[in-house]
Image (cartoon, rainbow, N blue to C red):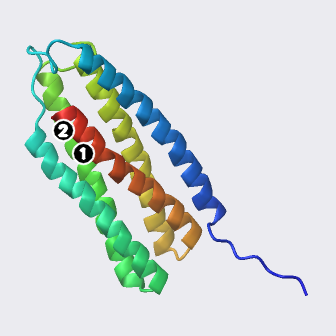
């Protein structure tokens, strides 16, 4: 009799975890550079640069957290086979994530209008590097959530792909408070 092995972690999820570790290193490098440069500056942020909207972005941070909570609830519903709840919570997670990205985009437009650009200062360069890198990851994760949502509606979503996309979204949600606290305060 051949003994069947049980998979503890599906290949897609393991691959996503490995990818996330590389992204953690990327953000660690960016954050390290930011800390070194800001520690060596006389005034940080520079006096002549616009101040970041910490309160408004704080509200947006709450929206992002709710997106993660909704995805957790969708995952739990998916595991229990409750289709209506899964669809509802996936949609809410996707909507909250999309709101977060659109709100960040509107913030960028305002800041550029106030003179904070990639070339206005090292401060501006780091702002757009750190927050922009996160924004790109958020857009990629939203696209994954979108794919998940439509696969689920066509009854083609697997637990493995759900788990992989879920890990990536949790990374996006989890790295944000670090960036928010570091850059906005």
Q: Is residue 64 left or right of residue 140?
A: left
> Circle 1 sits on which residue?
102
Q: What residue is at 26 percent from the left and 58 percent from the top? A: 65
Q: What residue is at 26 percent from the left and 55 percent from the top? A: 64
Q: Counting other residues with Cα less than 10 Å from the Cα at mark 1, is it few (<14), some (14-19), or many (20 or more)?
A: some
Q: In the rendering, at what x and y percent does residue 20 appear?
A: 51, 47
Could you tell me how many numbered marks the image carries? Answer: 2
Quadrant of res 66: bottom left
> Circle 2 sits on which residue?
106
**Residue 99 visible in the shown view:** yes
Q: What residue is at 46 percent from the left and 54 percent from the top? A: 168
Secondary element type, mark 2: helix
Secondary element type, mark 1: helix
Q: Is residue 54 left or right of residue 63?
A: left
Residue 21 got which mark? none
Q: Is residue 129 left or right of residue 64?
A: right
> Which image quarter is the C terminus in?
top left
> Which image quarter is the N terminus in?
bottom right
Q: Nearer the viewer, residue 68 or 42?
A: 42
Q: CA distance from mark 1 to mark 2?
A: 6 Å
Check contact, mark 1 vs mark 2: CB within 8 A. yes
Q: Point out the residue furthest to the right here.
A: 1
Q: In the rendering, at what x and y percent does residue 151 appear?
A: 51, 68
Q: In the rendering, at what x and y percent does residue 171 appear?
A: 41, 51
Q: What residue is at 55 percent from the left and 53 percent from the top? A: 17
Q: Nearer the viewer, residue 175 or 81?
A: 175
Vertical position of residue 153 compared to residue 107: above or below: below
**Residue 90 visible in the shown view:** no
Q: Counting other residues with Cα less than 10 Å from the Cα at mark 2, is it few (<14), some (14-19), or many (20 or more)?
A: few
């Amino acid at each position: 009799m051949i003994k069947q092995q049980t998979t503890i972690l599906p290949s897609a999820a393991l691959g996503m975890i490995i990818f996330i570790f590389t992204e953690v290193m990327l953000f660690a490098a960016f954050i390290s550079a930011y800390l070194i440069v800001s520690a060596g500056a006389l005034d940080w942020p520079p006096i002549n640069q616009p101040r970041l909207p910490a309160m408004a972005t704080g509200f947006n941070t709450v929206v992002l957290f709710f997106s993660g909570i909704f995805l957790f609830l969708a995952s739990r519903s998916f595991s229990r086979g409750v289709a209506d709840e899964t669809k509802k919570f996936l949609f809410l997670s996707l909507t909250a994530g999309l709101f977060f990205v659109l709100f960040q985009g509107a913030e960028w437009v305002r800041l550029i209008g106030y003179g904070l650009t990639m070339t206005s200062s090292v401060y501006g360069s780091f702002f757009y590097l750190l927050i922009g890198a996160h924004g790109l990851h958020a857009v990629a994760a939203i696209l994954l959530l979108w794919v998940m949502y439509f696969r689920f509606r066509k009854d083609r979503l697997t637990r493995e792909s759900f788990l992989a996309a879920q890990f990536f979204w949790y990374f996006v949600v989890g790295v944000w408070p670090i960036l928010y606290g570091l850059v906005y305060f």
